[in-house]
Image (cartoon, rainbow, N blue to C red):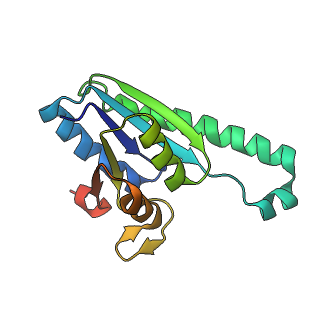
Amino acid sequence: MYEKVLVTLDGSKESECIIDHVRMLAKSCGFPKVVLLRVVEDFPPAALTYIGQDRARDAQKKARAAAEEYLSYAADSLRTHCGGVDIVVLEGNPATEILEYAEKNNIDMIAMASRGASGIVRFTLGSVTRRVMDHWKGVLLTASPESCKP
């Protein structure tokens, strides 16, 4: 039913709760492809002025490398349950990048936690989740971090 599932993670324990739900679905549905995605946010222009272009570029490279390592680790827990697991790191606005990636890559379902690292809660959903929910026309699986507590 779902050929390609996009799982978004932001590096927080809260965002990782979605992995358990995707693993359970993959066991029963046998997803052929899961893509783990993390978006590294750009520096705000004011920060660039303060720290400088070179330092900002170095920090972005380190953040990107850390994101790739994090996703590789997260992918290990899914590999035995899915046909294949890819990792993707993008830079920019998280909601925009998630939506653009999903549209361009024929994603059947987006899976994400309802709240992550930002700590910003709009009603009961994180702002990134809310924006994805408002604009994504396909299937969206969300899980609250509380759903993963024993």
Q: Which percent across, then down, holds residue 70?
A: 50, 38
Find the residue positioned furthest to the bottom.
123
Q: Residue at x 78, y 60 (%)?
A: 45
- Name the residue located 54 percent from the left edge and 34 percent from the top edge: 68
Query: In this view, which residue lies farthest toward the left?
Result: 28
Quarter of the rendering containing residue 3: top left
| Image x and y of residue 81, in percent | 23, 28
Q: Quadrant of the C terminus?
A: bottom left
Tell me if residue 135 comes above or below residue 60 in the rendering.
Answer: below
Q: Is residue 122 found left or right of 24 in the rendered image?
A: right
Q: In the image, is residue 68 above or below residue 149?
A: above
What residue is at 29 percent from the left and 56 percent from the top?
142
Of 14 and 138, the residue lying toward us: 138
Left-right relation of 29 to 119: left
Count of residue discs: 0
Residue 103 image point, x, y percent: 43, 42
Residue 125 on image: x %, y %? 37, 68
Q: Residue at x 31, y 28 (%)?
A: 33
Q: Is residue 112 left or right of residue 59?
A: left
In the foreground, 63 or 95: 95
